[in-house]
Each structure stands twice: as structure tokens, then as C-alpha cells.
Image (cartoon, helix red, strand yellow):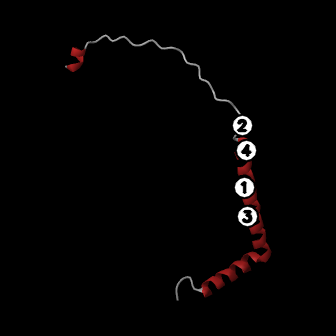
Amino acid sequence: MGATSIWHWIIVLLIVVLLFGRGKISEIMGDVAKGIKSFKKGMAEDDTAAQPEQGPKVIEQSSVKPVEQTGTESSKAS
């Protein structure tokens, strides 16, 4: 006689039906289904909107002068 015997599940199901009623449970399941459909539709719309046809972006660069070395190799070794 474990915690998940069939009788326990039947009693829990009976209590849920008594508390919420058969109509309320079907309304909740319908709302869940509508939410899932809306979520999938939103994800599909995001995928199509996120792929606009644009060319590659070009970043303008300015030339940089090289840095002159002021020290010698012997001063770096010490």
C-alpha cells in the first residue's frame, strides 16, 4: 500500500471534481489550450519578423598611427 495507490488517486480526483465542478475543469483546460495556441502563434510571428532581408553592415574605420618605441631592449630585461 504505497502513497500512489489507485484508491488515493480516485479520492483526489473525486475531491477535485467536487470542488471545481465538471464545467470549471473544462473551462480551465480550454483556457490552457488557447494559451498554448497563442504562444505558438506568437513564436511563429517572431521568427518571420526577425529575419528581414538586409545586406551586411559596414563599419567605417579610421587609420591609426603606430606607436613609437622609446625604450631599448636592455632596459626591459632589468
Q: What residue type is labelled 2?
A: Pro
Q: Which residue lies furthest to the left in this view?
A: 78
Q: What element carries label 4?
A: helix
Say above or below: 8 vs 69.
below
Q: Badge 2, how many Cα within 10 Å: few under 14, some, many 20+?
A: few
Q: Badge 1, how many Cα within 10 Å: few under 14, some, many 20+?
A: few
Residue 17 lies, in percent from the top left, at: 73, 79
| Label whose residue precedes the other's in the sequence (2 or 1) | 1
Residue at 60% over, 84% down: 8
Q: Which amino acid does label 1 sit on?
A: Lys
Question: How much space separates mark 2 and mark 1, taking CA atoms?
Answer: 20 Å
- Report the residue marked by disc 2: 52
In this view, the mark in front (4 or 1): 4
Residue 49 lies, in percent from the top left, at: 73, 42
Q: Quadrant of the C terminus?
A: top left
In the foreground, 53 or 47 = 53
Q: What element carries label 2?
A: loop
Q: What residue type is labelled 3?
A: Val
CB contact under 8 Å: marks 3 and 2: no
| Label whose residue precedes the other's in the sequence (4 or 1) | 1
Say above or below: 10 vs 52.
below
CB contact under 8 Å: marks 4 and 2: no
In this view, the mark in front (3 or 4): 4
> Viewed as shown, does residue 64 lie left or right of 35?
left
- Report the residue marked by disc 4: 48
- Report the residue marked by disc 3: 32
| Label whose residue precedes the other's in the sequence (3 or 2) | 3
Question: How much space separates mark 3 and mark 4, taking CA atoms?
Answer: 25 Å
- Report the residue marked by disc 1: 40
Question: How much space separates mark 3 and mark 2, taking CA atoms?
Answer: 32 Å
Question: How much space separates mark 4 and mark 1, taking CA atoms?
Answer: 13 Å
Question: How much space separates mark 3 and mark 1, taking CA atoms?
Answer: 12 Å
